[in-house]
Image: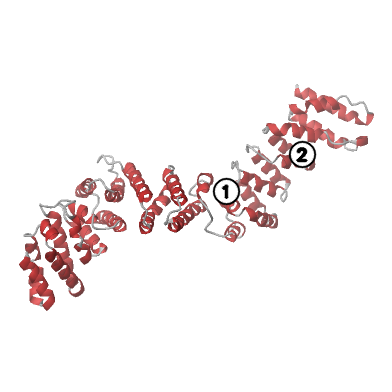
Amino acid sequence: KDIWAYLLTRAVKDKNEAQIKEIVENFDVALEKITIADFSENENLRTSISKFLSFLKTQEKQNFDKCAKVLIRAISNSKTYSGKDKIKQLAFLTDSLTAQEITEILCEEVASQDAFNVRSIELFSSLLDRSQNESVASAISQRIKQGSKYNTVTIKKTKELLDSLEESSVKMIYHYALGALLSDMGLAGSLSFDAEQMKNNYRTMLLNLFAEEKITSGLLQISESIYPELEKVLGETDREFVYSFFKLLEKKISRGNGARNVLEEIKAKADKKLEEALLLQKVDFDSVIGFISASAFDKNFYLNKIFIEKEVSYNILGLYFHFFPRDTGEFYREIRLNSSDINFIRKIIENLKDKNTKVACDILENIFYTTSSFLKMEILNIMQGFSSVNENFIIAILLGEALSVKRQAMGVVLKNKALRDKAANALLSIPNSFGVKNKLLNENINMVGEFRLAEARPLLEKLAKLKVFWKKSLKDAAKKALDRLT
């Protein structure tokens, strides 16, 4: 071993082509006599091999590739290999080989050897960081896909890879990437592999790592693995991962430790992903809006999207009102300017249907005064499904709009108990000196009778007892309305 280390060093130092060629040709033979323990305990040997590989990388790339593959295979196949045995002593490999080179070699091994030793991944995954391991796992998955038609050997290799690693965060990375491959094969169940569980375990592992990490560089690195999961989860029905991550972020930020600036940076990036998901209609507005601290866009972005691009959805409208509450005047000014565009106004109204929120109610109220009687009735029809409405808005309609619109407003009144007394009083307590308001009052009396507004009974009974001759029509109408209430 010492002699071979000397030969390696001498060949590089002298740049002796004949010696280098001979070493390359016999590299695998020499490695057969070297064990993991030799690499771990003999620093001179590690240094010599590392320098030799570095020389080949710059001078003889083809021979470098050949020797690197032989070295990885030899270490993986060593009978004295132990995943935890002085693994740090093998870090010299990452001095000679980049993560990309290790990835390429491992992928080639997976694709070319039926008897591929899965310990290669177990060994080298421990020498790479999280990001590099994710790249390796993804690359191996892709290489398996490209290299076969999901035959028996492919399935066997994939299952071996999944079963090989000991429990760790690294294992979850490979399980997540390769488990997705098995799901693509449609064979996850037949191999007793729960891909859904692996996915959830991987996400739980990411959250646990993020919760425990205190170093800013580590937080940034883990967050880069979390962002893609956020995007995937937003397209799923179970969004517990999103809720858990944002609650965890808020908790860590509130502690106010030295990583606060980085955590706020991570929060801003995560907020943007949620906001973009809302813009693309991937997620329900009310389920995630509470997690977003601030918009990644300005008010003009939303005004242009709504009034120039004519892109309307409840999410877009809700985002504008949520983030720019002081600028609602600009929104309503644009509504007035676009009031002649009936199709556009109708589109806004349609997107607020079944949205039982204050934002929806406020927008519909403001559109109401700018549009036609037909759309006014459509707005009131939508409001019948709201649990809460602006009482003053409804009363103003009952006092000032055309009969057809007032009748539609009565549908809102009947479904809101608190409004009934107020509506009855507003409709039937109109001052009427010398009968000048007879026509209006008759209209209102007939309407409360038609809709059987029981709360109007005391006022109707009072009107039914009128004795002044110019109010006889009111008296008769009130009696008929009372009959309809019984």
Measured from the top left, where is residue 344 in percent x and y? 63, 53
Is 216 rendered above or below residue 167? below
Quadrant the N terminus occupies: bottom left
Residue 299 location, quadrant: bottom right
Report whether 199 appears left or right of 231: left
Report whether 252 appears left or right of 322: left
Give the camera-side residue of 81 and 189.
81
Measured from the top left, where is residue 364 in percent x and y? 66, 46
Q: CA distance from mark 2 to mark 1?
A: 28 Å
Identify the element where label 2 is drawn: helix
Q: Are marks 2 and 1 in contact (CB under 8 Å)?
A: no
Q: Residue at x 65, y 38 (%)?
A: 388
Q: Tell me the residue that label 2 is attached to.
A: 398
- Disc assigned to residue 314: 1
- Disc assigned to residue 335: none
Report whether 227 appears left or right of 155: right
Quadrant the C terminus occupies: top right
Is 126 rendered above or below residue 436? below
Q: How many marks?
A: 2
Q: Amino acid at mark 2?
A: Leu
